Image (spheres, coloured by chain):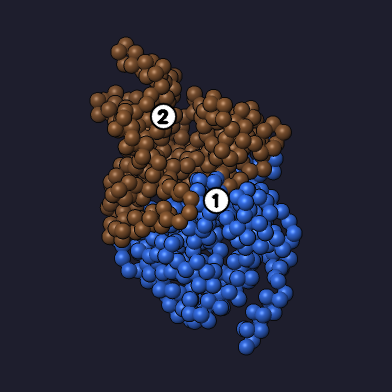
Chain colours: A blue, B brown
Amino acid sequence: MEEERADRCARLFAEASRDGVSSHGLNRFPRFLRAIGRGVVDVHARARCVGGHGALERWDGRGGPGNLNAHDAMARAIALGREHGIGCVALANTNHWMRGGSYGWQAADAGLIGICWTNTMPNLPPWGATDPRVGNNPLVVAVPRPDGHVVVDMAMSQFSMGALEAYRARGDALPVVGGYDEAGELTRDPAAIEASRRLLPIGFWKGSGLAVTLDLVAAILSGGRATHEIPADPELEAGLSQAFIAIDPTGADAGLVDRVIAHLHAGDGEVRYPGERTLETRNRNMREGVPVDPAIWRDVQARAAG
Amino acid sequence: MEEERADRCARLFAEASRDGVSSHGLNRFPRFLRAIGRGVVDVHARARCVGGHGALERWDGRGGPGNLNAHDAMARAIALGREHGIGCVALANTNHWMRGGSYGWQAADAGLIGICWTNTMPNLPPWGATDPRVGNNPLVVAVPRPDGHVVVDMAMSQFSMGALEAYRARGDALPVVGGYDEAGELTRDPAAIEASRRLLPIGFWKGSGLAVTLDLVAAILSGGRATHEIPADPELEAGLSQAFIAIDPTGADAGLVDRVIAHLHAGDGEVRYPGERTLETRNRNMREGVPVDPAIWRDVQARAAG
């Protein structure tokens, strides 16, 4: 891997852990190495433009590292957005982008509004069914702000399989219902949902419908695979389709975002704006150090030394 | 009102009823007339372009009829999308767009992917609070398909206030939890949620965060009002901000959407694609006639005669 790409790939993993998303940071790195070993990820492949016109481009990810492909695609969407006001890159044949929020922060760091999403392997039953037939297709929307960007990074399932696993390992119930048990009843028991594989879409029929539509838009524009054509195995998931949109808000009312956040913070309850907790975690970890799982850290260090 | 605009305005109301969304069709027409009477809606005002560059334009709705402004904005986004691959019109100072799905069907009828959303008056408590401080900001995503477009049209609350009212009037419980009662417990009782005004965002914290972010993007790009600056009274709600994006999928794999729908229809359960029920209702109503509320129909007929 070229040094610049290796650095950037490592940085994207490290930044996910720094921001508190270790599930797609350090903790995901061993699986990324296995994907390279299996040939799912080709570290030498670079995404390239294969079509489009004007402010819309179609890119082929060629099975390269998912985070580098996504970062390259959003970088190009940003350039198109600066040139045309709005730009879009649709990316086919790519791999898991790790933390989706990374590309929202990337657009916002550049001063643009970023909207991006990915499809996934089938891991969510559509509304009305019990078997996983749609993806949980994370959606990211980011708005730039000097004192901290507003970034939504949300999958279409209420919880990811990884989140269910983490709650179960801690012996905790989910804070809200997250899916169905084998009897078809809504439950907060993570183990029951892992057993049934019936995760709940956000908003019941609404998240299910949005997941279907995001999959269609990404696959149509990129010329890539739709969810049902993607291998339904986390170790073999490949050939994803993604969309990256960047919009240039130059000339916008500079104080608007702060006013909206001030209004959210006023009144009753403890309300956070999307991205607020991420920034708090980032700042704390930059002061105190980024916590790592010691076993995974030793494993990665040993491979680096080897 | 000029004849073409009056015809188009009436058609958009009628199509909502035809498609089974009478809450934003005929049943909403009396309130629209009241808004004209109060000066909230200026029937003579036309939206016009006031800024932007390339594929991104900023429009001022000047307090005109919300459905005509939205229809004009999406028509311009479609033209920009055809020219640049992707186009965006951000619309400020507009009024309620009635059925959001109309502008998704409009883009898809033109052969383009349509993405649009609106902000609203504050009507949804953000996650962590009990008072309505964010809008339920409906989001529409539409994908063209010869045998029937795929169209998601979803507010960020699990149910609208109008839906709660309809369930209560029928004496029915909600099919899933829709908000909190006065004691702060999740409930399927529509009257309890109407009393507390604590509607549930889709996906709990997720819909709340997405609502905040959609509001920001629409208000920033259009230079218009954010939700907390909009009068919190359904009769006076005005000065909305909206975003319309159209993407040209020319050259896309023509069979992809049908394959995805076939996969959704295969397997267990009864799964509909988004927009499927709308099309069934439309076809039935075009054969058998569009059902109307007799009292509202007589009222509108009397006003037309008067």
Query: Which residue lies under the disc numbered 1?
Result: A201
Tell me: A89 left or right of B269.
left
Query: Is the residue at mark 1 from the same chain as the one at mark 2?
Result: no
Residue A15's x, y, as percent? 60, 67
Say what amino acid the circle numbered 1 marks.
Pro
Residue farthest bottom in this picture: A306
Could you say which quadrant of the image residue B98 lies in?
Answer: top left
- The residue shown at (64%, 29%) is B192
Say what amino acid the circle numbered 2 marks.
Ser
- The residue shown at (45%, 66%) is A230
Please tell me which residue lies in front, A259 or B210: B210
Please tell me which residue lies in front, B235 or B142: B142
Q: Residue B22 — which label?
A: 2
- The residue shown at (56%, 78%) is A34
Relative to B225, say whether A112 is above or below: below
Please tell me which residue lies in front, A151 or A58: A58
Residue B227's x, y, as percent? 53, 37
> Distance between the Cα atoms at labels 1 and 2?
27 Å
Residue A178 seen in the figure: no
Tell me: A38 left or right of A268.
left
Relative to A267, say whether B289 is above or below: above
Residue B220's x, y, as percent? 47, 44
The quadrant of the picture occupied by the C terminus of chain B is: top left
Callout 2: chain: B
Residue A12 seen in the figure: yes
Q: Give SS at disc 2.
A: helix
